[in-house]
Structures are given as C-alpha cells and as structure tokens.
Image (cartoon, coloured by chain):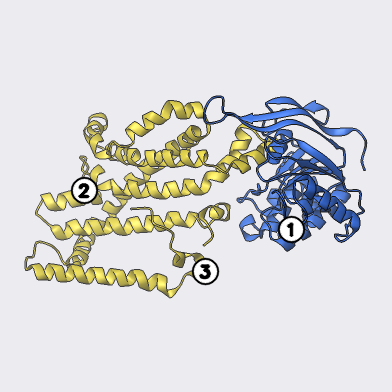
Chain colours: A blue, B yellow
C-alpha cells in the first residue's frame, strides 16, 4: 500500500527526561528505528508507560529527541506542522467553539465558500451532520473525537498522529470508531501513525504493528497484518497476528504469563 | 462577598420553587430574629427591621436615596472598570510570559496584602478631596484579585488546547486571541465577579474620604451627625441589596455558550 518511499523515518532515537536528582535521568527511549511509508496505517503498541506516546510526541514535534534523527516528509522535525495533525487522547477540541467552528479551525486562511464546503464535507464524513451548531459539552466522548478527526482532515493534514484517541471511549463506541477510521483512511489516503496499548485495536486497524518493549523502550518487532478490510476478527490470520503480538509482549492471548 | 459554590437550583431551566422559597425562608427567619432581639433588648438605640424600612423611606423623601446610590455606583463602576482594564491584560501578560511573571509577581504579591484602608492617607495626599481618591481605592482593592486570578488561569490552561493550536500553525497574537483568551475567559468572568464584590466591599472605607455623598458617606454621616442608627443600617441594607444585584448581573455572563463549558456540568 502506498509508495515505497518512507514519509516518516526515525533513526537511532533516544529520549531521556531529567530525573529528580542529577545523574538520575529517566531513559524512556533507546535506539528506536522506525519507518512509515506514505499512505500507510501503522500502529505502535506497547505496555502502558513504555514511551510510545513519547515517541509519537517526538515525531509530532511536541518533544525533541535527546539523540538521533527524526525526519518527516523529507526534513528534520522542528516543531508541529499544520500538514501533520495530532489527535489527542484527552481531546483537543476547543470547548468554546461549535462543532463547525472547530472543524473549520485550521481553515481560516481559506476563502469563506471553500471553508464552508470543506466543513460540510468532513462533518458529513464523520457522521456529525445536524450537530454543526452544537458545543462539545453537548456531545458524547465519541462524537468529540469525531470532531477532532474531522478538524484534522478538513485542514488537509497529510499525516495523522493519533495518541490512543479511542482510549477513553466505551467498548462499542470504540469498535464503531475503528470501523469509521478505516473507512475515512481508505477514502482520504492519509498516512496514520497510531499509538495504542490495545493489541486487538492495533491488529484491527494497522497495515503494520510495531511492538515496543518496556522502558527504556525500543521496537521489539514488527508484525505485518496483511489482511483484507473490513477484517474478520475470527479469521485465522487475524488471530495469528494477535497472538504473535501477545507473545512478543510476553503473554498469551488469555492474558496469562509474564505481564 | 465570598465565592459561593454554584447552587444547582439556580441553573436556568432548573429554576424551581425551591430557589425562591429557600432564600425567602432564610430572610424571614433572619428578620424575625432581628426583630425579637431588638424588642428583647429593651433599648431603642438599635433599629428594628421596619424602622430601617422607614429610614430608607426618609432618605427617599429627602431626595438622598437616588443621588447617594448613584454616587456610590459611579465610584465603584469607575474603580472597577479601570481595574478590569489594567488587571486583565496584566494578568494575561504575567501568566503567559515567564520573564514577566518572574519580574512582576513578587511586586504584585507584596502589594496585594496591603489593605486599601492603609492607602487612605496617601490617596488624600495625592488626589485631594474629590471623587478620584475613593475611585483610586476601589481600583486598588479590585485590581490585584483580577490580576492574580487571570494570571493563574493562564498558567493552568489545559496544555492540549495550546498544543492543538500550535499544531494548526498558530503562534504569537493569533494563538493568544483564538485560543489562550477564550480558554481562560470562564475564569476571567469568575475573577470579575469576585473583584466586583470586593470593589463594592471597600466602598464604605473609600467614601470615608472627604466626599459628601454615597452610601458609605451616609453610614458615617448618620452616626456622626445624630446617632441615627436606623439610617446606618439603611445604608448597610442598601449596600447588601445592590451587591446582590451586581453579583446576579455578572453571573448572567456565565450563561453564554462561549464560557459555559468552564463551569462544570450542572
């Protein structure tokens, strides 16, 4: 899927945070290497607190790596970029703006007519038609995440960085959001780097799953999920990929083993 | 005036009979206790509730009620408006720019605990016997709470909003205008509400300064020129009633859609 040329390349990336005492730095990432090709859907999974979110924040330009090289779209990352939008788990939709104002947030430089057209299009794409004038506080958590995704798409982001965007949603909403995200991704041909601790979620979504180790984290292994979409969650291929990731993370699919 | 928790019964559509009856019940109990206490004391120096009503009527007949209320509102309005015009931008500046915070915060925190009453001699020295001196005191009393609350609001802004805004390429003034300001607007309104209460609170002290009108002046004058405690209490009741109305007016600002998200789900 997509061209062979990687759009995101991370080479020998290290990240440490200053500890409470000098010399007691917290090493979060060690020797991380990863590639994401244009149009690819890649999931980064790993145990909670392993540093996958840190990795995404580095790629997204919100944190700077301690050492190594991080390039996106041919240039070293130097801060966030409007062409590459971050979708936050804690929801970055602005509560003082309506749904349509939020979705049009990245479009203020465009002509009024074009802005209205794009807002309308992406409001419909995420299934929020009829809620244009609503405020985020009037929406459910899943709808707010849809607003945030639509806001990124409307601004014509080429790359989406998603940091456990469905983590705070209930199970059924999560399933629905995954299906919708796949549909949107197929329609829009965006590159998506998606962080989650949910292995099932990763296997349902990704072309490739990068499995991270405990801290200091590195990429333990890469699992390609070469299954047609929509994915059959009972198919042998799905179960094999899922169990493979479970075993890389040191447990079996029934949640036993060394957690 | 203190910061009260928001009462659920006062919320818009939930406006119910309880929200009228409960405060009314408290008022009736208070007036009854007051009346009985005055009667029970056997002395007539302290006015009973109805004497205070008569006192307000007397002020009205003497043509003092409206001019005094107007004079007080005039001074409080000017002191408060200038405090808002200074305090809000100053608080935003201190909250957003770390060097400004480092430079000015100790100064602000050192000025803040000085009671406005302590400034009275200097206010008279600087501004003489006109409206400026009480306006200055009211300004002083309200500018620091505004500055400090707005500063704290900016410092505690949810980082996800700022990061999302930066992600969309905003920086500098447009970041400030489109995200930082709206994100702290609910707390700005709360700060204004508290500060207006304080402004009204220092009115009596401010009108001790060589002015000859206003509700604060009424209280001093009624005591000094004839021990008219019914008029003293009339002035207190008027100050309380107007303070309540001012607070209700500011609270209406909290109902706007742009800020309602900031007051929790009630």
Q: Is residue A158 visible?
A: no
The nearer-to-camera label among 3 and 2 is 3
The foreground one among B226 and A2 is A2
Q: Are marks 3 and 2 on the same chain?
A: yes
Relative to B6, is A78 on the left or the right?
right
x and y percent of residue A205 in the render? Answer: 82, 51
x and y percent of residue A232 in the render? Answer: 88, 60
Q: Which mark is residue A174?
A: 1
Kindly identify which chain the residue marked by label 1 belongs to.
A
Q: Which mark is residue B13?
A: 3
Q: Are marks 1 and 2 on the same chain?
A: no
Read off the residue under disc 2: B217
Relative to B226, is A35 on the left or the right?
right
State how far apart marks 1 and 3 are (Cα): 33 Å
Per the image, label 2 sits on a secondary structure element best described as helix
Quadrant for residue A6, please give it: top right
Quadrant for residue A132, please give it: bottom right
| Residue at 35% in and 58% down | B244
The nearer-to-camera label among 1 and 2 is 1
């Amino acid at each position: 899927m997509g061209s062979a040329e990687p759009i995101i390349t991370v080479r020998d990336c290290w990240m440490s945070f200053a500890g409470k005492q000098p010399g007691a730095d917290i090493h979060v990432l060690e020797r991380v290497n990863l590639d994401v090709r244009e149009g690819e859907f890649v999931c980064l999974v790993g145990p909670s607190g392993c540093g996958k979110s840190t990795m995404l924040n580095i790629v997204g330009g919100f944190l700077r790596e301690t050492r190594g090289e991080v390039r996106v779209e041919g240039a070293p990352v130097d801060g966030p970029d409007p062409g590459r939008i971050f979708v936050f788990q804690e929801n970055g939709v602005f509560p003082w703006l309506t749904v349509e104002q939020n979705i049009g947030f990245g479009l203020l430089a465009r002509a009024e007519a074009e802005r209205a057209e794009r807002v309308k299009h992406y409001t419909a794409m995420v299934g929020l038609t009829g809620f244009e004038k609503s405020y985020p506080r009037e929406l459910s958590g899943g709808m707010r995440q849809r607003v945030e995704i639509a806001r990124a798409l409307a601004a014509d982001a080429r790359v989406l960085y998603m940091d456990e965007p469905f983590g705070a949603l209930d199970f059924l909403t999560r399933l629905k959001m995954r299906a919708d995200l796949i549909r949107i991704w197929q329609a829009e041909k965006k590159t998506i780097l998606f962080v989650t601790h949910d292995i099932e979620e990763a296997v349902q979504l990704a072309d490739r799953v990068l499995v991270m180790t405990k801290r200091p984290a590195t990429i333990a292994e890469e699992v390609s999920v070469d299954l047609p979409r929509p994915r059959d969650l009972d198919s042998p291929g799905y179960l094999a990929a899922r169990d493979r990731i479970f075993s890389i993370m040191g447990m079996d699919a029934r949640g036993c083993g060394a957690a | 005036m203190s910061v009260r928790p928001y009462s659920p019964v006062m919320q818009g559509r939930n406006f119910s009979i309880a929200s009228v009856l409960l405060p009314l019940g408290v008022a009736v109990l208070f007036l009854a206790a007051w009346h009985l206490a005055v009667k029970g004391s056997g002395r007539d120096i302290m006015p009973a509730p109805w004497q205070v009503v008569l006192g307000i009527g007397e002020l009205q007949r003497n043509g003092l009620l409206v001019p005094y209320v107007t004079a007080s509102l005039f001074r409080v309005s000017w002191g408060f408006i200038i405090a808002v015009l200074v305090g809000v931008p100053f608080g935003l500046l201190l909250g957003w720019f770390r060097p400004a915070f480092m430079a000015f915060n100790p100064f602000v925190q050192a000025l803040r605990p000085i009671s406005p009453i302590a400034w009275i001699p200097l206010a008279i020295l600087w501004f003489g016997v006109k409206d400026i001196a009480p306006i200055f005191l009211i300004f002083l009393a309200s500018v620091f709470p505004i500055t400090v609350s707005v500063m704290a609001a900016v410092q505690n802004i949810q980082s996800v909003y700022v990061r999302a805004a930066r992600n969309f390429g905003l920086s500098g003034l447009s970041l400030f205008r489109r995200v930082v300001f709206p994100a702290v607007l609910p707390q700005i309104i709360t700060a204004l509400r508290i500060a207006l209460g304080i402004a009204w609170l220092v009115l009596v002290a401010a009108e001790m300064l060589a002015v000859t009108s206003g509700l604060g002046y009424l209280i001093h004058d009624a005591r000094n020129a004839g021990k008219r405690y019914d008029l003293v209490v009339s002035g207190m009741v008027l100050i309380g009633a107007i303070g309540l109305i001012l607070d209700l007016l500011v609270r209406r600002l909290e109902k706007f859609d742009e800020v309602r998200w900031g007051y929790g789900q009630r």
